[in-house]
Amino acid sequence: MSPSTSLSVIIPFYNETAFLTTAVNSVLSQGIGSVEVIIVNDNPDTFPQAFFDGLGFPENVQVTHHARNRGLPSSRNTGIDAAQGGHIAFLDADDYYLPQGLRKHLEYAQRQGAEITHAQTVITHVNRVSGDVIGPDSAYLGPEKRGRYDGADVIEAGFFIESSWASIYTADFLKGKNVRFDESQVKFEDRIFVVEALLAADSLAILGEPCRVWRKRNNSITTSAKSYEDQLLKLNLVRKSVDLWLNKCSRHGRHRAMCEFVRQTGYMITKNESSPWYGTFGFSGDEGDQKLTEMLSEYFAGLQVNEPDVVAAFDAKSPKYSGGETGGGRITPHDMFRFIDAVARRDYETARGIVNLTVCRPRPFALPHLPKPTGGGVRILLHAGLHKTGTTHIQYQLAHNRKALQANGILFPQTGFGFVEGKEPVRAGGLPGHQALVTSVFQSGGALIERLKGEILGAQCHTVVISAENLSQPDAPYAARARRMRQVVEALSEIGAVTPVFMYRQPDAWLESYYREISGNGAPLAYHTPGEFLVNNMILLDFGAIVGAAEEACGNQAVLFSFEEALQGYDDLTLAFLDKCGLDVPPQQISLTEDTRYPSTCDAQLEIARITSLLVQDQSVRQNILRTFYTQVENSGQKHKLFTPRERRQIVDMFCDRAAALFAERGISDPRDGWLERIKDGGAPPEVMIPGSYLDALRIAGVMSGTGIMSAAPVIGEAPARQRPDHVTEISLHDLDRIAHETRAARDMAGELDYMRNSVSWRVTTPLRTVMRGYKKLRGIA
């Protein structure tokens, strides 16, 4: 141990490449002068030292490599052995500390002098930065428990500590009392360590404030599907934790063991049918489930639990506790005992009845019967995506050629096409297609459907083309996607039979374009790095499920074709679309208009959008800021690859694996080899340089949006004009830079104006006065 190092933070690493830099920087940014970060690499075959060298961490971040994969508990033990700090903390590679959170936690630990110092943890919502203090911390370890506890009070105060990483430990405690992680418990090891630590500790301090963030994300240990081996480890977690209380707790050991047992059993049975334990209680014929069921019965019977044990152990503050009736994820102490007793006696019928009564049951997935079309044989083509496959271009061209299409019996409806009030695009050129028509099905009882019927009746056409790529919902679960699609199809079935249309493209290029789109537009996930976005949104690559949900909803096979093949085989995507959909329109009748491209954001614009989205939590405010920002800057066209070659290959493989059955059924050749050949090896993307003019434009946009008062957007029925208003197009970038310079000068005036800048009137009127001054100067108004 080094006297000059106050804290060692141990970060086990396996493959969390998208999150590691954030985790490490969350430690380094705390302002703790004598901190060391120990990264324990538990995946040396994939990540050599060169990988970590490329991350550019400073000298106080060191990497220790295992010779082979040994698991999370071994990684933490390796870190303990290597630690030089007087205190030791654990941080998972995909989690991070709150600003000043670790510093506050450490300073409190140093003042209290306890062997263990606990602080609250915030758990985020899946794939979000927003979140809440975890349940046990909120219920049992809040500000009212702040202070130091000694002797027998340690266990009473700290019983509900959730995990090892919630506390800071003195190095003397962990090393002197040989408190270590159970290396045979390769997953779900935290609670066992916590029980061991509480039983060994003579002192505990509770801060009662949140200091760190548990990032709940897709494809992590806590959210991934559980295998039979995982379930065995879960069962071992219960056994080992209970046995520790029974064998090592000298005071009230039986009661503590029952508290642990009831707590863990509550987690087993109060979730829903997707819970990994659900099949264990006789709900499936799976051989593994049957083995686990027998193990549970043997274990439950051996504990000889009685009802007074359960009543005394079941805490009324537990989120699983019900003082009234069992149901909705809560259970009464009496029913908890009945369940435990039934499993012990192998009365699985009774156990199943209690589980079925208890679980939070998700809405069952069953699509209603699709009514027969009543519209006299009109064919409806529902162009549902994918995004970033030229849909905006096709929509503009079809809108431009309405008369030519109608002359050939094809209607591209005006009803519900374009923007509605308050929904103008964040970037110029954006177009939602017929999204308003789709939205009306959910929000206004299908009022626009009646208008559409009238338009079709007047057009006397045999085919209707509706284009709304948002309807593909690539980020939605299958059931939700199919239900939403079916609602739209049911509304349209009054007019005619619906056939879905999808265009797909090389998936790594598609995902990159999609990421640029939603990030550049300030969508809810816009702050994610490309790596984080990939890890958290692999559902986007399930093209087979996307098409399958649409086909199930429509009752018809989808039209499928490749974006790349359409570009190569036709003069324009629009002509490819018409041909692939079986729409017989002579190409010479189609007049292709120019300037219909909707280019993705350049690298610098993307970085500005990500920064804005991370700092401005309100989506409408940040989108208003970005909308103003984009009117002031030009797209540089500089777009480097956002994903590494390794990630790009992973994307292609995942897409092809999930679309294999669909492609085979349709006779589509597997495109995997061709796509992989186009991926070139290369280093990391270059650092993005943000021009000063971009920063000035962002500042102006922030000032203009600072009041929080948004102007209404125009209602556009036809394809929207691509030009900006005259009073905007006449302001050049040079003019805006000049206005920005004058605004800076005004803000640097004498200090006596400081109080004005902090007033409400100043904040409200400053953006208005800035814009008006610039407008007058440009117009030559005195």
Image (cartoon, rainbow, N blue to C red):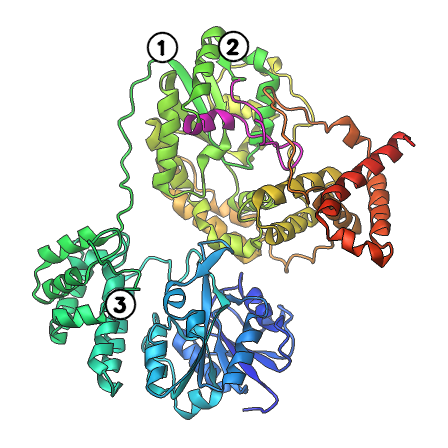
- Check the image and report above or below for 283 versus 118: above
Foreground: disc 2 or disc 3: 3
In the picture of the structure, the residue carrying the numbered disc 3 is 315
Tell me if residue 64 can be seen. Answer: yes
Q: Position of residue 389 (x, y in %)?
A: 55, 35
Q: Give the mark, 3 or 1, whose residue is nearer the N terminus.
A: 3
Is 149 on the left or on the right of 5, as rendered? left
Residue at 27% x, 36% y is 366
Q: Residue 234's image quarter?
A: bottom left
Residue 376 badge: 1
Q: Which residues are magenta?
A: 415-443
Mark 2 vs 3: CB contact within 8 A: no
Three-letter amino acid code of the residue under disc 3: Asp
Element on which disc 3 rests: loop
Foreground: disc 2 or disc 1: 1
- Quadrant where the C terminus sits is top right
Residue at 58% x, 56% y is 644
- Check the image and report above or below for 505 versus 219: above
Three-letter amino acid code of the residue under disc 1: Gly
In the picture of the structure, the residue carrying the numbered disc 2 is 408
Element on which disc 1 rests: loop
Q: Give the mark, 2 or 3, whose residue is nearer the N terminus.
A: 3
Between 365 and 442, the residue placed more toward the observer is 442
Foreground: disc 3 or disc 1: 3
Q: Position of residue 233 (x, y in %)?
A: 28, 70
Is 781 on the left or on the right of 326, as rendered? right
- Quadrant where the N terminus sits is bottom right
Q: Position of residue 360 (x, y in %)?
A: 27, 50
